[in-house]
Image (spheres, rainbow, N blue to C red):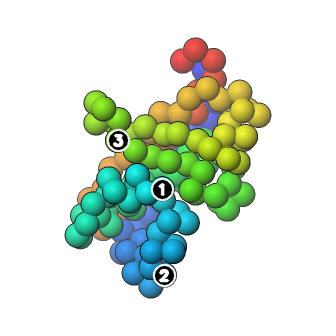
Amino acid sequence: MVAGVGVDIISVARVRSMLERRGARAMYRLFSPGEVAEAGTGVMAYERLASRWAAKEAVLKSLGSGLWQVPLRDIVVTKGQDGRPEVSLQGKAQERATCLGVTGIQVSMSHEHEYAVAFAVALKGDD
């Protein structure tokens, strides 16, 4: 059963500018070391990080939570063995999901030069 849905779109240039201005400290406040490693280096890294940022915000929306009520770092988006994105929750994000009876989250992400987009579905029960 669907507990909530969320969608987000973000400018890759905005993410790049913020991360370049604020450096590694900001990077690791938003992303886990695994997310940073999967993003790699170079221009495409910013597209990958932006898509993860959009996914994190979409997950927040699917949980009915506003931005900054739950730290983005509490939502980790990595590539699964089959290539699909996987979401794991910790801290306040996990607490919120537990309160709602959420047992899993499915997410889809995409990026294309200027923008990254993500859609998340929070699931209850055996779905």
What element does badge 3 sit on? strand
| Residue 34: % across, % down | 40, 52
Label disc, if present, on residue 22 of the rendered structure: 2
| Disc 3: which residue | 79
- Distance (Cα) linking label 3 and label 1: 13 Å
| Residue 110: % across, % down | 32, 50
| Residue 111: % across, % down | 31, 56
Mark 2: amino acid:
Arg
| Disc 1: which residue | 32
As drawn, 38 above or below 94: below
What element does badge 1 sit on? loop
Q: Relative to residue 79, is residue 86 drawn left or right?
A: right
What element does badge 2 sit on? helix
Residue 35 appears in which quarter of the rendering?
bottom left
Q: Are marks 3 and 2 in contact (CB under 8 Å)?
A: no
As drawn, 127 above or below 87: above
- Distance (Cα) linking label 3 and label 2: 26 Å
